[in-house]
Amino acid sequence: MKQASNARPLLVARWLWVVAALVAGIVVVGGITRLTESGVSITEWKPVSGALPPLTQAAWEAEFAKYRATPQYILINGPAGMTLATYKTIFFWEWVHRLLARGIGLVFALPLAIFWVRRQIPSGYHLRLLALLALGGLQGAVGWWMVKSGIAHDVKVSHLRLATHLGVALFTLAGLVWTALDLQALARGQKRSRLTGLGALAGLVLAVQLVWGAFTAGLRAGHVTDEWPLMNGHFWPGPTQSGETFLQAITGDPAIVHFLHRWWAWVVVAVLVVLARALKQRGRREPSIAIHSAFGTQILLGIATVMSGVSIPLAVAHQLVGALLVVATVWGMHALGSERWS
């Protein structure tokens, strides 16, 4: 398709890579926020004024008073003797998380408007970029929906809402990467990539693993055992709660969720090995190496996280590499369906 003379596909692609890096960064900060139990420390959503933290002692006292009304404080942190100084620590991570989200919104929306006005967006990409912008807005709404579950109903946010929040973030990351790669192909005079059957399978099995990883994090299921490959001396841990339905067990029982997350990982590995070998056979060594490196590192970090009793640095690294595995897998899916190898 002939493009307007001022279309800049490579420039737009580079911008999308910057946004993708920021999304990976906020996934990491989100992991720290969860692991430090900071997610419900800010009990209101103020898109503009909330960009600034409390600046006076009175403002800090007011924020702390709102937090003291949450179940998390009443049932856990209050009896544990939380002070204002301790509260400031968990406030910091949630504030950074929200500030970074605002920053990503600006980094996406403002250049998009500039590219649009200057007619630098290649034909056929306008609606896709608007869809990515809408996903960013949805992510903000889902994030507040998640936080509300921990403010009013429980000592922690809903693990189902947490999985939705992480899922939207990683789906957005995948969309950014795929679009950037399409634009880079366009700059080389090639057509957009197509999604192959193997690529779709790889994306699906990885998505299942990521969702159960979010369930594992939200349920604190990593603390069920510090053993690997057994769980407290057994291969099958059994349910930890009575009267569960099958669906409740696989999505809400900490031991079973942990079991599914650790063993579905090998299904993911098997499919990704097939994907990587297919890429190598087509001469695409770079994405093949990236996929192998990412899933190998991720498996080792997952095992180390469990055996360390969920060390925060290891758990955060596990979440970061999970995001990088998404990038590597999308790169491989895109390369497999590219014009060059069709």
Image (cartoon, rainbow, N blue to C red):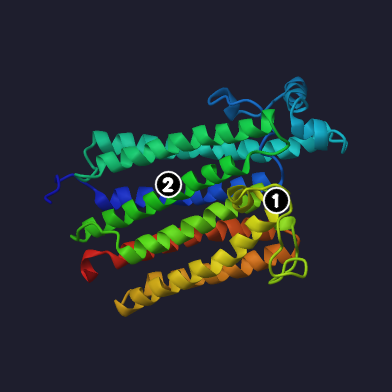
Residue 58 x/y as whole percent:
76, 20
Residue at the image position 55 percent from the left and 64 percent from the top: 264
Q: Quadrant of the C terminus?
A: bottom left
Residue 94 relative to residue 270: left or right: right
Residue 37 x/y as whole percent:
71, 42
Answer whether labels 2 and 1 touch (C-beta < 8 Å).
no
Nearest the viewer among 221 and 144 is 221
Nearest the viewer among 175 and 50 is 175
Determine the secondary structure under disc 1: loop
Nearest the viewer among 127 and 240 is 240
Write down the residue under mark 1. 220
Q: Say few, some or many: other residues with alpha carbon within 10 Å of mark 2 (under 14 / 14 to 19 / 20 or more).
A: many
Q: Which mark is residue 172?
A: 2
Q: Is residue 9 above or below residue 284?
A: above
Which numbered disc flags the more N-terminal residue, 2 or 1?
2
Q: CA distance from mark 2 to mark 1?
A: 25 Å
